[in-house]
Image: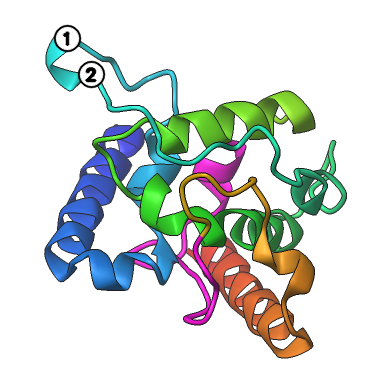
Amino acid sequence: MDLELDRVRMLRAAVIAAVVGLATAAGLISNDALLSHGAAAGRSLLQTKKDCPVTFEGANYTLITSRCKGPLYQPALCCTALADFACPYSIYINDVSTNCASNMFSLIHIYGKYPTGLFANTCKGDTNGIKCPDDVPQVQPGQEGKSSAAIATAAQAALVAACAVAFSLFIVLS
């Protein structure tokens, strides 16, 4: 029952994020994007998704795999690593009409061998999703899958780390 309630809340958050518009979507990774790759989400012909305009095959997955390690996955480390990796793609992975989020999480799980639902259950963010720094450049179609985190400033990294710590405290206290 709690899982169904969480899904309703996530759906509401996704609707609110969609209403706010694409301009703010670049600044977060929506909770809906975190859930859209799960096996529990059934699909039908009416829900067929468009191909993602960016590719995740050449992306630097060591941004996640070097920091988010099991068997005790630390939420602060894993969520910061996810944000560092995914924020440059946030416009695309938040577009629920494409298979971008599914493609990205499939490859993250292949490279990291993570348990199903690790990021969806751990990295909640606020009601809109995981906050991304405003000045993270978005990967454009045709570009190699590179994350700007490799060239991010120390201030950006500190901001993301602080947000991840706050989110993990929120999760622990709730």
Left or right of residue 156, residue 17 in this image: left
Task: Report helix, strand or loop for mark 2.
Answer: loop
Using the rendered image of the protein, determine whether residue 113 is visible from the camera's viewpoint.
no
Residue 24 shows which numbered tag? Answer: none
**In the displayed structure image, the side of residue 127 where residue 172 appears, left or right:** right
Q: Secondary structure at mark 1?
A: helix
Please provide percent x and percent y for residue 154: 78, 86
Which residues are drawn in magenta?
Answer: 118-138
Q: Residue visible at 51% across and 29% down?
A: 103
Residue 167 position by quadrant: bottom right
Q: Is residue 143 left or right of residue 23?
A: right
Mostly what secondary structure, the magenta segment? loop
In the picture, which quadrant includes the N terminus?
top left
| Residue 155: percent from left, percent from top | 71, 90
Residue receiving disc 2 = 48
Query: Which residue in the rendered view is the most extreme toward the top?
Result: 45
- The quadrant where residue 50 appears: top left
Mark 2 residue crowding within 10 angstroms, few (<14) / some (14–19) / many (20+): few
- Which amino acid type is marked by label 1? Leu
Residue 137 in the magenta stretch? The answer is yes
Whether 34 is among the magenta residues is: no
Type of amino acid under label 2: Thr
Alpha carbon separation for disc pair 1 and 2:
5 Å
**In the rendered image, the vertical position of residue 156 relative to residue 83, given as above or below:** below
Which residue carries the number 1 mark?
Answer: 45
Q: Residue at x 18, y 20 (%)?
A: 47
Q: Is residue 18 visible?
A: yes
**Residue 75 locus on image (x, y percent):** 68, 56
Q: Is residue 82 shown above or below 107? A: below
Q: Nearer the viewer, residue 137 or 43?
A: 137
Judge from the rendering whether residue 150 lies leftward or rightward of residue 136; answer left or right.
Answer: right
Please say if the residues under marks 1 and 2 sit with CB atoms less than 8 Å apart. Answer: yes
